[in-house]
Image (spheres, rainbow, N blue to C red):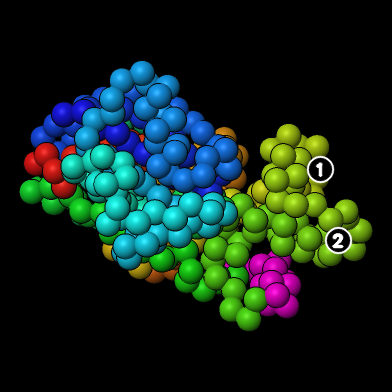
Amino acid sequence: MEIVAADIGGTHARFAIAEVENGRVVALGEPATMKTADHASLQTAYQAFEAGLGRPLPRALAIAVASPVANDVIRLTNNPWIIRKSLITERLKADQWVVVNDFGAVGHAVAQVPSSDFIHLCGPDTPLPSEGITTICGPGTGLGVAQLLRRKTGYQVLETEGGHMDFAPLDGIEDALLKRLRKTFTRVSAERVVAGPGIVAIYETLAALEGRAVPSHDDKTIWTEAIDGTDSIALAALDRFCLALGAVSGDLALAQGAKAVVIAGGLGFRIKDRLIRSGFDQRFVAKGRFQGMMAAMPVKLITHPQPGLFGAAAAFAQEHTQ
């Protein structure tokens, strides 16, 4: 069965034709990427995708969207589009459709992509468990968190707001980081540290501890300088970010009763080489009496180039083709 898969974010909208059968994704076509600012609405972008494809679109649609999706009206962050689920059939000519949160889509992708779409980060280099819970943690603009629950009869993806749990400092540097963040945020969540924008506060905290005056940079500049190795404070901030990500993902695994962890998101992929060589693994297992249990847990990073599109198609397949 052919369907349209869509992944709608704040800056870009991606579309592709997918084939689904018996609850799974059989194939995902080449994606078309559009800037949301170039289109007045999802409908006009959808029509542009159809025009570029040169044939009528299938009347089945799966949408992953960077927003909560429980209500009929979906308003996106950093994107003026408004999606009304009750109008999808009328506006997009879809007889069957599903709308899923973008990180919920990532959870479906983790459940269905082949093992070749993962790389090993730490713990035993074994496949993801065929039963039980896998924690999925994705640092990006925010910190996405989901659970994948596998049973013999199938799987279920549970979207969560785990990224908004409290940030727990583990040493003096992180004490100073928390103190700095509290000047702006009364309550400091893990997302304030372990997400793309969090690198700014880490960078400024490290500079202050060394008594160094540094220019005011946005997070994109600091990430570039850190990954390129052109700024020693930015590089130290990246190392500290990896430590914090290890601690937070370990906390999430404990809270969810996980047997494995998958790191997702574009930022995770961008720093994958640094994660492997950082203290991520030491922080992940450093859970006191549960250190042995944590050390026995495989931790992987998903490398599929389009997990949002693939996961949206997988969500449709689960709902409509089983």
Q: Under tag 1, what secondary structure? A: loop
Which is more toward the observer, 222 or 119?
A: 222
For the N terminus, give its image quadrant: top left
View extreme (bottom): residue: 186
Q: Is residue 97 left or right of residue 15?
A: left
Which quarter of the figure has residue 22? top left
The residue wearing badge 1 is: 231
**Magenta segment boundaries in residue numbering:** 170-184
For the C terminus, give its image quadrant: top left
**Magenta highlight on residue 175:** yes
**Residue 283 visible in the displayed image:** no
Residue 239: where, in percent of width, then height? 66, 49
Looking at numbered disc 1 in the image, what kind of residue is underneath it? Answer: Asp
Residue 272: where, in percent of width, then height? 54, 38
The residue wearing badge 2 is: 210
Q: Is residue 230 left or right of residue 151?
A: right
**Residue 37 visible in the displayed image:** yes
Q: Which residue is painted at 42% across and 65% down in the image?
A: 162
| Disc 1/disc 2 C-alpha distance (Å) | 14 Å
Q: Which residue is painted at 35% across and 56% down in the image?
A: 84
**What secondary structure prevails in the magenta region?**
helix
**Magenta highlight on residue 117:** no
